[in-house]
Amino acid sequence: MLSVQSFFDLSDFPYGNLFEPTAYAWQPLGTLKNYMDAATYPKYDRTLVGDGIPLAGHVIIHEGRALPGTEAEIVYGDTTKGRLQIRLAGKILEGASLLMAGVTLLGNRISIGRGVLVETGAMIKSPAIIGDMTEVRQGAYLRGYCLAGKRCVMGHTTEIKHSIFLNDAKAGHFAYLGDSILGNDTNLGAGTKFANLRFLPGNITIFQKESGRIDTGLKKFGAILGDTCQTGCNSVTSPGTLMAKGAILMPNATARSGYHGEKALLR
């Protein structure tokens, strides 16, 4: 009931080896730092992508290289459907990604996948891994140890730290995610907040009817949303919230800590 495999389908997730299928669903949060610290990151041309300085112009990422985008022709199609198109010198650059002018990258451990769009005003601190066809929207703040799979949305003025997005996970608008995992095809309503720290000191515990309270070993733990979960606008999750597959948190509602079953409706 609380295992990784009961929350997520990892068959198409590019970083599935981070997860132990039979471990507790929060296991990846305890190993994410080591996993990302051990990853290999491309060495982009720092004169183009900078370090803590907003980009003066568009930069193209193609086949592991950073290229100036000043002469590029760009079709801003739906990024998550693979419709971002970049043409340079009359040639379509298959799988090219775009960092728009005004993006800020901090640190040299940042990996940008194929067909990614990072919009003006986004700030990405390393380490960060952004999967294929993911859209990082204007004003997004990635505070480090952020891992996103394919076709994700890391949204407008959304703050994310030490969190994992599985494929097609979307946090489109005004959200906060700390120490959390979004499953496949999850969607957060505008203004969703994941609280990740208790008022009282100590590790966050999860109550399970069969075995009582389980110590997660985590002092900071936001929420885990299983595949296809949704939250409504201005909803909040308490530290250590686990929503099983298909669960829904209604608008303006607060989810209590602990486990909520499949297709649960939280009001």
Image (tube, rainbow, N blue to C red):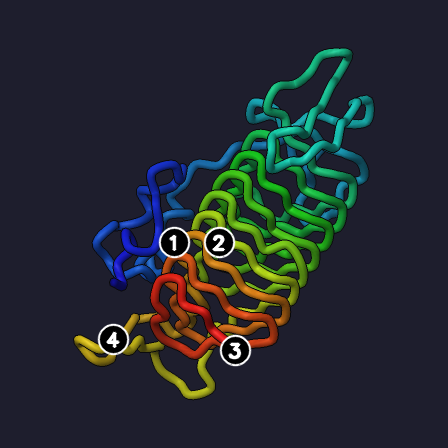
Where is residue 225? Give x, y as percent.
43, 60
SS assignment at label 2: loop
Of the pair 56 and 31, the residue shown nearer to us:
31
Q: CA distance from mark 1 to mark 3?
A: 27 Å
Q: Which residue is mark 3?
A: 254
Q: Which residue is mark 4?
A: 208
The answer to whether marks 2 and 3 mark residues whose Cβ atoms lie closer than 8 Å is no
The answer to whether marks 1 and 3 mark residues whose Cβ atoms lie closer than 8 Å is no
User: Which is more N-terminal, label 2 or label 1?
Assistant: 1
Give the residue type that dot 4 points to.
Gln
SS assignment at label 1: helix
Report the side of 45 relative to 201 (left or right): right
User: Which is more N-terminal, label 3 or label 1?
Assistant: 1
Mark toward the viewer: 2 or 3: 3
Q: Residue at x 28, y 78 (%)?
A: 207
The answer to whether marks 1 and 2 mark residues whose Cβ atoms lie closer than 8 Å is yes
Q: Which residue is mark 2?
A: 145
User: Which is more N-terminal, label 3 or label 2?
Assistant: 2
Where is residue 244? Give x, y as percent.
37, 62
Give the residue type that dot 2 points to.
Tyr
Give the residue type that dot 3 points to.
Thr
Q: Quadrant of the N terminus?
A: bottom left
Where is residue 62? Give x, y as percent.
61, 24
